[in-house]
Amino acid sequence: GYVHAAYHALLTAIVLWCFHVPAELIAYLALFEFVAHYVIDYGKVNICKSNDWTATTSEHYWKMMGLDQFLHMLCYIAIVQVVL
């Protein structure tokens, strides 16, 4: 989970750097992305595990995947709003 979240934070930092966002702001936003990504994924995994939802056994699994992706997109929208 930590490595996955760190990977996304690093990619966010690279994209922001490409758009010449100040380094201090990049650091804060990458940290936000790391924490948010980890918490969202941690919640999804634990909810699915506690209910025995898997890709092949429950449509609720796919609803959680959709919610997971929606929350990640909201994070990216928030990052863009801060930068703009």
Image: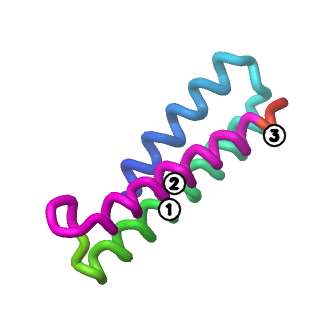
Question: Which of 25/62 is in front?
Answer: 62
Mark 3 residue crowding within 10 angstroms, few (<14) / some (14–19) / many (20+):
few
- Residue most toward the front? 59
Q: Please state, as top left, top right, bottom left or bottom right, where the C terminus lies in the image.
A: top right
List the residue tagged with mark 2: 37
Question: Which of 73/41 is in front?
Answer: 73
Q: Residue at x 39, y 61 (%)?
A: 63
In the image, is 22 to the left or to the right of 61?
A: right
Name the disc covering residue 40, or none. 1
**Which picture quadrant has residue 53?**
bottom left
Q: Amino acid at mark 1?
A: Ile
Mark 2 residue crowding within 10 angstroms, few (<14) / some (14–19) / many (20+):
many
Q: Earlier in the sequence, mark 1 or mark 3?
A: 1
Q: Residue at x 80, y 33 (%)?
A: 83
Question: Which of 56/30 is in front?
Answer: 56
Q: Which residues are magenta?
A: 54-80
Q: Secondary structure at mark 2?
A: helix
Q: Residue at x 72, y 46 (%)?
A: 28
